Amino acid sequence: MCALIHFVLVLMLFLHFAQGWVFAQTPDEEGLRLRKQRIPKRNVAQWVAFVPITAVKFPLFIVSRGVKYTGIFIEEKALIPRTRDLLTSDDRLIALYPTASLGGRAGLSGELNFFDKRFPRKGNRLSLQAGFSTNSHQNHYIRYRIPEMFGLMHLDTRVRYHVKTNEDFFGIGNKSDRGGRTNFRHEELGGELKVGASWTKWFRTRILVDYTDHVIEDGDETYDSALDKFDLQTTPGLDGAALLGAGGSVAFDTRDSDFYPSKGSLAEFSAIVFNQTDGDDYGFTRYKLELSHCLTLFRTGRILAVRLSGEINTRLSDDKDTPFFERANLGGATDLRGYSTGRFRDKDLILLNVEYRYPLWEAHRDRRGAMDAVVFVDIGRVFNDLQEDTFSDYKTSYGIGIRARTVEEFIFRAEIARSEEETNLILKFEPMF
């Protein structure tokens, strides 16, 4: 009964916040102008929810800005995932716990998490999260997972609402100017359904359905607004869009670990078709291919890891395009680590990551923790057409770092990455690949 009450309360609050946003889309220039002039107003429930954030926002403002301008990229979702381990355990069926995180974009964030491993029967999992930050970012979702159906399949579904008040945009193309940095406010309300099947130990497939309503507005004024500097002709998608996508993926995976493999390969291909549901301006097909391989060099624990990724976005017809926020992008802690997040955007991309991992100390039965030193190189670029200039003008970043892990799981990675534009400090609580 307690779990049901929590579920109903969070669902009611989520739907209350979300109402009115789904129908806010207008795909023409007049709609874009009106949204830029519109002053967002909070209802009573939103003001009440923001009272704790407002109370602590001012004294933390300088701290969060200082972190932001140093170019530090810190995982926004899990500053210390171990806090969950302190408050919950695998044998617990139900839990309610808080987490905190620090991000260069979001500032200081706080989330309230709830999960129930017995809804409606033991083994299935219902998860809820409500999160707010000092930079007015929001991250809410309701997720339901069935790990096993018919002994072969699994299901994962989620309803989500995200707000980023200061997402960066430098323009479209591989030659976009870093000095032309702008930002925008990006609201996303949607849901997704994933149905997967593991046919053998190494081969799996997945079907994906995704709906997202995107609203683009002026950013937090740290930089010029992207809506003022760019227009729909050069930057499709500034008017927002509601997109429905459906597709699937196939994967062949022989790696010895999902979180930190030391040997084996992964080959995964996906194709998803997206179409606009509130207009006829946007429609595209996204193809993605990822190949990775790990092998031991000279001695156990010394690993050479290589990943090659590619993405192509093609129009469904001549009169439809791919919105800028859905285009392939490079930059940040998961690809070109020496560049700002979202530094380069265009229709297609190629990315190569190479890492050499050297054990400083290894995990044993009597010493569960392990630490590795890492040297890495990232090479990639975006393309308007992958068949043009395929082998020229690639961007490169390189650096060193450390990885902490246990026998069972990954803990964190800390890295220093350098490029021709900047040097970034990276701290994330999930592996690179």
Image (cartoon, rainbow, N blue to C red):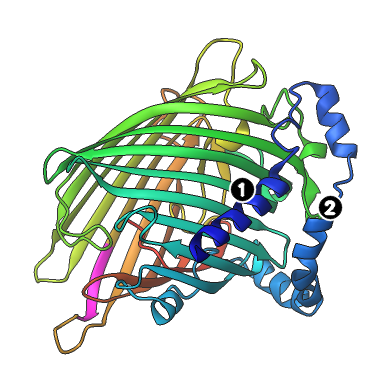
User: Which of the 4 image quadrants contains residue 287?
Assistant: top left
User: Which of 144 and 379 lies nearest the eye of the viewer?
Assistant: 144
* Amino acid type, mark 1: Tyr
Residue 251, percent from left and from top = 23, 38
Residue 429, percent from left and from top = 42, 68
Residue displayed at 60% across by 60% down? 130
Q: Residues within 10 Å of mark 2 (few under 14, many from 20)?
A: few
Position of residue 317 in the picture relative to residue 180 (left or right): left
Residue 285, percent from left and from top = 45, 23
Check the image and name the residue furthest to the top. 318
Q: Is residue 425 visible?
A: yes
| Residue 382 part of the magenta segment | no
Q: Is residue 394 visible?
A: no
Please name the residue that numbered disc 2 is placed on. 42
- SS for dot 1: strand
Residue displayed at 63% across by 68% down? 109
**In the displayed structure, would residue 27 be above or below residue 357?**
above
Check the image and name the residue furthest to the front. 1
Residue 301, percent from left and from top = 16, 71
Residue displayed at 73% across by 60% down? 136
Magenta residues, start to end: 356-362
Give the main secondary structure of the magenta stretch: strand
**In the displayed structure, would residue 244 be above or below residue 122?**
above
Residue 161 is labelled as 1
| Residue 359 part of the magenta segment | yes
Precedes in sequence: disc 2 or disc 1: 2
- SS for dot 2: loop
**In the displayed structure, would residue 404 be above or below residue 239?**
below
Position of residue 145 in the picture relative to residue 199 (left or right): right
* Amino acid type, mark 2: Arg
Residue displayed at 79% across by 55% down? 220
